[in-house]
Image: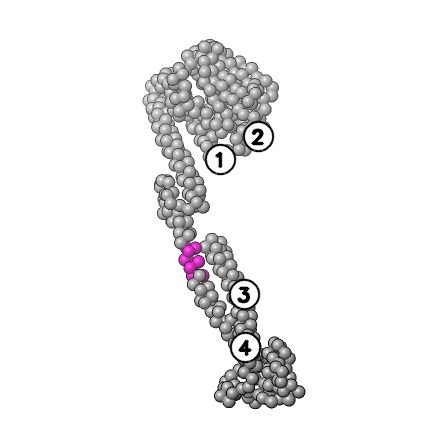
């Protein structure tokens, strides 16, 4: 029974049935007792009225002898002789017990009331079976309205349950009619208090899903735009290689083609790293890692580029610097920071990397001796594909965007400031415990 409506109706109808049965039982017993008491009162009043008359008039005697009358009147003398009976009956009580009494004669039960005077005893009797039948009929008549009202209440409960659950059906219908492109919020006005939190939660989910889709569409559009240029360049370099007139020209064209392939491969690698660390993207579970060891590996990957520019790489690291995180993503973060520092610093400059433990958690600091970034542009450089000087830059414009995405996934913060070396300082602070 998964339907809320059916479950609610079963519970309500069950409660109604139990209440109706209880009320019917109590009413039946009460009416039965009251009817019995009323009949006893009639017996008593009839006997007392005959006692006060002194004798039974002929017309009254003929009325009492009517066979349709339920009552039987008997009178005994003071010495016990039967001197009067209202009508013949094969099983009349042969004696009288003063007051109310139950008397059984043969197979017939009687309810009697007897009263004594100075010279005689008067008894009024009524068959117990007739009394019980009359009392039962009165009790059944008293509960008949309840038997009629109970089904009407059941139908009313069914209608009220359907009416109460109609807002839920309307919300379900509104969700059912949506397509994959419709992420507008559901109407939330006039909703019951029990349904409003669900609708608000759904609207929040739709909003987050819309934002994620917008980011994804922008990412795909930007990636397609950025890939178009290197692929076009590769095509031109291949044509130059094919048209090279001599070995020297072919060698130069081949070197240019190789450099273009390297740049395209780096761009694709950056795009994949950014996609893997997007919010909501499936990633490897966090594990215990050493940030100092990750920094050493990142510098080892960048040594060839630093040597080509004559730059000096310096690492100052505590050992170890424990951290909970994704080692592959953290390696991309450190490598991008070091790569940016080497790429944007003048040839022969020094790049300094510091890894240690601070009060808030682990800390990574990268300093370079380049031209730095003005404070007004320090937030803009985290945008995807943003380059301060597109003509002179060889990067993809994704380095710092990836750094912030990986840092956000680990609950870390990224801050840009002036470096003591004269260029830019990038500080990444990791908390003791990453977000769940």
The correct choice, above or below, for 150 with respect to 174 in the image is below
- Residue 246 in sight: no
Instruction: Looking at the picture, tell me which residue is in the foreground, 242 or 51.
Output: 51
Could you tell me how far apart the alpha carbons at marks 2 and 3 are, in whole angstroms? Answer: 70 Å
Neighbour class for label 2 at 10 Å: few (<14), some, many (≥20)?
A: few
2 vs 3, front mark: 3
Give the x, y percent position of residue 280. 46, 34
Task: Give the residue at mark 2.
Answer: 287
**Disc 1: which residue:** 282
Kindly report the distance in space between the C-alpha atoms of the residues bearing marks 1 and 4.
Answer: 94 Å
Say left or right for 313 vs 120.
left
Q: Position of residue 178 (x, y in %)?
A: 36, 45
Q: Residue at x 47, y 31 (%)?
A: 276
Specify whether residue 163 is painted magenta. Answer: no
Front residue of 426 and 185: 185
* CA neighbours of label 4 inside 10 A, class few (<14), some (14 to 19), many (20+): some
Q: Earlier in the sequence, mark 4 or mark 2?
A: 4
Instruction: Name the residue rendered at 50%, 27% in the picture.
Output: 411
Residue at which label 3 appears:
26
Instruction: Tell me which residue sits at (52%, 69%) in the image.
Output: 31
Residue at (38, 20) in percent of width and height: 387
Name the element at disc 3: helix
Location of mark 4 (residue): 45
């Amino acid at each position: 029974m998964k339907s809320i409506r059916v479950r609610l109706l079963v519970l309500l109808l069950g409660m109604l049935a139990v209440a109706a049965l209880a009320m019917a039982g109590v009413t039946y017993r009460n009416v039965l007792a009251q009817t019995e008491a009323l009949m006893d009162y009639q017996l008593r009043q009839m006997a007392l009225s005959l006692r006060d008359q002194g004798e039974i008039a002929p017309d009254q005697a003929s009325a009492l002898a009517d066979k349709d009358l339920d009552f039987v009147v008997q009178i005994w003398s003071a010495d016990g002789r039967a001197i009067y009976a209202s009508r013949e009956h094969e099983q009349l009580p042969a004696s009288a017990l003063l007051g109310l009494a139950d008397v059984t004669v043969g197979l017939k039960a009687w309810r009697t009331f007897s009263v004594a005077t100075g010279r005689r005893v008067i008894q009024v009797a009524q068959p117990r079976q007739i009394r019980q039948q009359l009392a039962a009929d009165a009790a059944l008549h008293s509960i008949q309205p309840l038997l009629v009202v109970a089904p009407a209440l059941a139908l009313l409960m069914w209608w009220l349950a359907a009416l109460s659950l109609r807002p839920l059906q309307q919300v379900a219908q509104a969700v059912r009619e949506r397509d994959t492109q419709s992420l507008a919020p559901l109407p939330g006005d006039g909703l019951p208090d029990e349904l409003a939190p669900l609708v608000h939660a759904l609207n929040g989910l739709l909003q987050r899903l819309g934002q994620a889709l917008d980011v994804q569409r922008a990412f795909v559009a930007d990636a397609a735009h950025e890939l178009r240029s290197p692929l076009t360049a590769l095509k031109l370099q291949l044509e130059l290689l094919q048209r090279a007139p001599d070995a020297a020209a072919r060698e130069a064209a081949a070197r240019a083609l190789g450099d273009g392939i390297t740049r395209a491969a780096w761009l694709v690698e950056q795009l994949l790293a950014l996609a893997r660390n997007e919010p909501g993207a499936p990633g490897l579970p966090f594990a215990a890692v050493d940030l100092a060891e990750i920094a050493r590996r990142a510098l080892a990957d960048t040594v060839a580029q630093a040597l080509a520019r004559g730059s000096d790489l310096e690492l100052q690291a505590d050992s170890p610097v424990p951290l909970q995180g994704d080692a592959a993503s953290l390696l991309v973060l450190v490598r991008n920071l070091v790569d940016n520092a080497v790429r944007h610093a003048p040839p022969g400059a020094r790049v300094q990397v510091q890894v240690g433990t601070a009060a808030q958690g682990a800390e990574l600091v990268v300093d370079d001796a380049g031209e730095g970034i003005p404070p007004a542009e320090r937030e803009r450089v985290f945008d995807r594909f943003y380059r301060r000087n597109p003509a002179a830059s060889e990067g993809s414009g994704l380095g710092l965007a990836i750094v912030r995405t990986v840092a956000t996934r680990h609950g870390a913060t990224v801050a840009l400031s002036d470096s003591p070396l004269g260029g830019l300082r990038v500080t990444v602070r990791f908390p003791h415990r990453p977000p769940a």
